[in-house]
Image (cartoon, grey):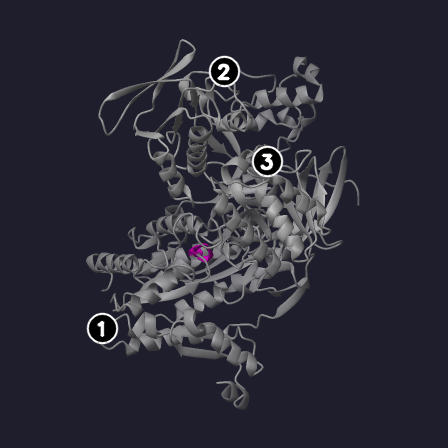
Amino acid sequence: MIIAERKPMEEIKQMIAPYNKLLLAGCGTCVTVCWAGGEKEVGILASQLRLARSAEGKEISILEATVERQCEKEMAAELKDKVGEVEAVLSLACGAGVQTMAELFEEKPIFPALNTAFIGMPEKEGLWVEMCGACGDCFLDRTGGICPMVRCAKGLLNGPCGGTRRGGKCEIDPEKDCAWVLIYRRLEKQGRLDLMRKYYPPKNFRAVKSPGRIQAVKA
Amino acid sequence: MRGEIVAFCCERSAYPAADLAGKGKLCYPDNLRVIRIPCAGRVDAIHILKAFEKGAAAVLVLGCEDGACHHITGNIRARERVRYCDMLLKEVGLDGGRVGMFNVAPNETHKFVRIVNEMNEKIKESGETK
Amino acid sequence: MTSCIRDKNIDRVVVAACSPEFKEHVFQQALENAGLNGHLLSVANIREQCAWAHEGDVTEKALELIRMAVNRTRLLQPVEEKELSVNKGVLVVGGGFSALNSAIQLSQLGLPTTLLERESTLGGRIRELENMYGFKTGPMIEAAEGAKNIDILTSAEVLEVEGKIGNFMVRIRKGAEEISRSFGAIVFATGYETEVTDQDFQLKPGVNIISQERLAQMLQASSPKGRPQTVGFIFDFYDENSRFPTLATLSNALAIKQKWGSEVYVLCRDVKVDSEGADQLYREAREHGVVFSKFEEKPRISADDGRVKVEAKDVFLGEDMTLICDLVVAEERILPPAGTKDLSFLLSIRTDSQGFYQDENVHLYPVASERKGIFFIGGCRGDLDFQRALADVSSVVMNVYGLLSSGKVVVEAEKVKVDPQKCVACLTCIRVCPHSAIQLARTEGEKEVAEISDLACDACGVCAAICPAKAIKFEGYSDEQILAQIEALGAP
C-alpha cells in the first residue's frame, strides 16, 4: 500500500494563496487507509484552511469530495462538475492520483496536499513502515522474505555491514532492527542458512524502466 | 461579539458533574455550551475545528478519570486527539491552549466549575471575546 | 405528550426541561406509547445547565440550547430493538474456591456450566486456606462433582476464544485431544500464585526461612519434631497490596501460639486490617502474646549458627533490635497465575500494572472485563481476601444469570453501523474497538468490510471518531448530529 503524509501547512497555504474557491479532493484507497487523504482528512484540512483564511480576515469557499481511486481516470472524472465550479484543486491523493487529476482537468491547477512517502504496511494502529522499494527486480526469495534494500539503512545486499549493535540493532538507528540479523534468523528457522554464503552481483537497477510501464500479457 | 466555550461532556462523568454543579447553584460563566457525548473518545478533530469555525472561543473535552473510562481508553484517545487539534489550530495561526482535555469525575462539581472558569479567564485575557 | 404526538402527527420531539439524566427515559416511553420510536427525542437541558447554573437572565442561552437540540433532532433516525438468542452455557475456568462456588451457584440457577481446570484435580489452593478460614474443601468439590448441570474438564486449558457474548466458540485442549464448545459467557477464576520474596534476603529458603505454605503444612502435621522456640514473621515490605499475606500472618501466628506455644514476633511496616475479621485476629494474636514490631527499613537477615538473625530498627523505640529465631516465615508476593499474559493476549483484554486482569471499571463493574460476557473473579484480578472473593462470586453469578437466563437478549439494532459502501477495510476500527466488537465480515462474493456486532458493541463511538473514511454512523451521536448542534451556536 502507498503511504503518504500531509504536507506542512505553510506549503499548502502558499500553494493555494491566490485562490478563493477550492476543491479538496480525497482518495478512498491507500491514503484513506494510512490516515492521510480520506474523507476525514479532507474535512479536517478544509476546516483548517477556512480557519486560516478567516484569521487573515479573508474569505474562502471550499468544496469537499472523495472518490474511490483518484489514479483511475474514470473515477476521478466523477469530480468533473465540482472541478468546474472552483479555481483550483487541492488533491489529497498520492502522486499518481494528483497526476491523473492534472491530466484529466488540464485547465485547472491541481496541487498536491500530500507527500507520497513509500510502499509500506501498518506496524500497529497509526504507524506505517516502509517495506518495498519498488526496485523492479524482487529478490525476497533468497532473503527469507525480508528486503534489505529498504529495511537495511545502508541497503546492503550481501550481508550486514559489521556495525550491527548488540541485540541485533542497526548502527545508524538503534531503534531499528538490523535487517540482516532478521534475515539470518528467518533463514535459520527455515534451515536455509546456506543462502547466507552466496554472493550476489550488484543489483541491476536497469530492471526499473524509467518511466515504468507494464503491459499485461494476459488479456 | 460572542465567545462561547463548547464543552463536549462524557455522559458518564462530566455531564452529570455539570448537572450537579447547576443543582448546587455553583455558578459558572453562561457562555458555556455543553454537548453531550457517550464517551470522550467519540469527539473527533472535525467537531473541535468546526466549533472554532462557528465562532467558539474555546473547546473543552471532558471525560472520565484516567483508568475509570467505561470504554477503557476513550479518555486517553481524547487527550491525544485534543493535543493533535491544538497543533492543527496552531498551524493555522490560532494560539495554543484554547482547546483542552480534562478528567472530571461525576461528583467533581468544583473541578468542573474551576475548569470552565479558568478557560473563560484565558479567553478573556487573549481578547477572544472581541 | 403522548396524545399530542398522536393527534398532531408529530414525528420528532424536543423536550426543554431538566437534565436528560433524570427523565429522558420517561419521555422516551411517552414517545413509544404514542407509537413513535423513543430515539427520536432530544432533551435541551435548560434547568441544571442553564437556569440553575447562572445568575441573571439566561433566557437567550436557554433558547440557544433549544435551537441546538432542535437541530440535532431533525437528523435523528429511529433505532429499533431486536431480540437475539444466546447460548445459556457458562464456562468457568479454574478449579479453586471462586471457580467452584460460582459453578455450583450457576448450575443451581439452571445454567449448564462447564468447569475447566488446568490441573488434574479440583481444589486449587483452597487446601492451604482451610486452616485459616476454618472450612473444608472436600464438600465443595463433592458438590461440584455431584451437580448434574456441571461438566468438569480437568487437565484442560483454553486455546482460543472466538465470537461474542451469547455465543463464544472456545477451543479447549484436554489431555491430548482438542475440543470445541460454545458458551454464552465465560468466567475466569484462575486464582493467583505466590512467590517467597527470598531473594531480598540473599538467602535461599530452607529449613529456617520458609513460606506461609510450608508453615501451614508444618502446623497441620500432628507432632512437629523439635518445636521452634522463637518464630519471626516478616511482611508488608514488598508492596502495598498485602491483604492476603496479612491474613495469613495473623492467623498462622495465632495458630503457632496455640499449638506450639513458641515466642512469636511479627515484624512489619503496617498491619492492614481492612479485611473482614482481620482486626479481630490481630487483637486475638496480641492477647495471646504475639509481639508486633514496626519497622520502616527492610530488616537485615543473616544466618547465625543454624538459626536466623534478624536485625531491624524499631520505629517506636528508635533502637536497633536483634532477634535470633529458630524459624523465619518470609513474606509472600501475590502474583497473577502463570499464563495470564498469554490468556490476556488471546482474549485481547488488558492486565493492570501488576499483571492481574484489569477490572472494566474499578468502582462500578469490578468483575466485568472490557469484553461483554467475559468476567474475571477472585485472585486473578488482584490481591483479594476470602470475603471479597465471595462477593465476586455473587456478583458474577447475578451478572451471568441476568444475561443468559432467558436465553435471549434485547439489543439496539445497528445503533453504530458501518456503511459497507464507504468502508475501505482499513482495519482501524477493529484495532481500536475497546470491546472487540468489530470484525471483518467475510461474506462470500462481497467486498470485505468491517462489521459491528450489536451484542458486543457498547456504543462508545471511538470507532466513529477514528474512521478515516467516515464510514461509521453512530445514530444519536453521528458527525452530522453533533455538528448540527455546533451549527446552532450563536445563530438566532
N-terminal of the pair, mark 3 or mark 1, is: 1
Q: What residue is pinned by disc 1?
A: C55
Q: Is residue C415 visible?
A: yes
Q: Is residue A203 left or right of residue A17?
A: right
Q: Is residue B21 magenta?
A: no
Provide residue C107's location: percent of width, then percent of height.
67, 53
Q: Secondary structure at mark 2?
A: loop
Q: What residue is pinned by disc 2?
A: A163
Provide residue B53's location: percent of width, then percent of height.
36, 62
From the viewer's side, name the closer residue of C153 and C436: C153
Asked if badges 1 and 2 are on one and the same chain, I answer no
The residue mark sitting in front, 3 or 1, is 3
The amino acid at mark 3 is Asp
Looking at the image, residue C428 lies above or below residue C398: above
Asked if badges 3 and 2 are on one and the same chain, I answer no
Q: Is residue A27 visible?
A: no
Q: On what subunit does the disc labeled 2 rest?
A: A
The magenta segment is B40-45
Q: What residue is pinned by disc 3?
A: C342
Magenta residues, dominant SS class: helix
The amino acid at mark 2 is Gly
Using the rendered view, name the quadrant where residue B12 is placed.
bottom left
Q: In the orientation shown, which residue stands out farthest toward the top? A: C305
Q: Secondary structure at mark 1?
A: loop
Provide residue A60's location: percent of width, then percent of height.
39, 62
Q: In the orientation shown, which residue stands out farthest toward the right? A: A219
